[in-house]
Image: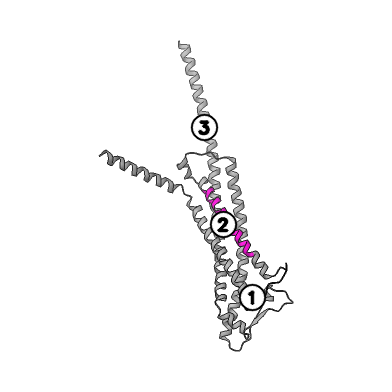
Amino acid sequence: MEENMEEGQTQKGCFECCIKCLGGIPYASLIATILLYAGVALFCGCGHEALSGTVTILQTYFEMARTAGDTLDVFTMIDIFKYVIYGIAAAFFVYGILLMVEGFFTTGAIKDLYGDFKITTCGRCVSAWFIMLTYLFMLAWLGVTAFTSLPVYMYFNLWTICRNSTLMEGANLCLDLRQFGIVTIGEEKKVCTVSENFLRMCESTELNMTFHLFIVALAGAGAAVIAMVHYLMVLSANWAYVKDACRMQKYEDIKSKEEQELHDIHSTRSKERLNAYT
């Protein structure tokens, strides 16, 4: 009988511990972190592969070649964009972890796990710093989203020309890379519907795959923007909590000090009365 009671108390203690642990998770920050990681993964992974597919299309169907030397051409720019993607993936992986840690230490449920904690000036400055930094990152991701829409627009034009060439027999439609700024004005790099390269490009899997990869990368950038907005709401709520907790902490300190003073006065008067009686 006693063993059953001890086993029941142990199970109850484990259950309460699990409830406390689940209550200490900042779910809003967790959702924003998952959304951020998903968006960054889609943008970086699909964007990298889409850039590699663009290099293949330019070299195979537009007959472009890398410029010898240190000349800044479209292939060098694509390589730079790939390195930027590597940096974005690493930076926001670390930033997501930092925001999760900040969420754990500023959520109200953490008090139930570790007891009352002191809100310091450093903690308030860290929360304000994260709000400012997240706002700047949100603006940066808006710019990335707008920039990612450019290749989607280019490939949509190319896909439209391929589609119209099959619907309109005898039409001579051309795509000139100079109108997108990919090559200089002096270079004439274009494909027309009457050329063999154009027909092979429209029938190839590289064009369709690269186009859809850029679309997914654009969706990933949009998801990152939504994650940044979500983080801003979470950080603003945390900042309000920290501010209120700081005020409450000052109030409790003043109240405790006044109660201690009243207790000392009462003790002193009691001693004086006792001495006067004796």
Give the secondary structure at mark 2: helix
For image coordinates 31% across by 40% down, the residue present is 6
Circle 1: residue type: Gln
Judge the density around disc 1: few (<14), some (14-19), many (≥20) Cα neighbours within 10 Å. Answer: some
Q: Which of marks 2 and 1 is nearer the N terminus?
A: 1
Q: Where is residue 54 in the image (x, y as percent from the top left)?
A: 61, 72
Taking the image as drawn, is residue 53 in sight? yes
Q: Is residue 92 magenta?
A: yes
Q: Main secondary structure of the magenta part?
A: helix
Judge the density around disc 3: few (<14), some (14-19), many (≥20) Cα neighbours within 10 Å. Answer: few
Q: Earlier in the sequence, mark 3 or mark 2?
A: 2
Q: Which mark is residue 25?
A: none
For image coordinates 48% across by 20% down, the residue present is 267
For image coordinates 55% across by 46% down, the residue present is 240
Tag nearer the camera, 1 or 3? 1
Most foreground residue, 36 or 107: 36
Q: Mark 1 points at which residue?
A: 59
Give the secondary structure at mark 1: helix
In the depicted structure, whether residue 119 falls above or below residue 37: above
Q: Where is residue 168 in the image (x, y as percent from the top left)?
A: 58, 87
Q: Residue 255 carries which label?
A: 3
Q: Quadrant of residue 205?
A: bottom right
Q: Where is residue 36 in the image (x, y as percent from the top left)?
A: 54, 58
In the depicted structure, whether residue 245 falls above or below residue 97: above
**Magenta region: which residues?**
81-103
Tag nearer the camera, 2 or 1? 1
Circle 3: residue type: Lys
Distance in Å between CA atoms under marks 1 and 3: 76 Å
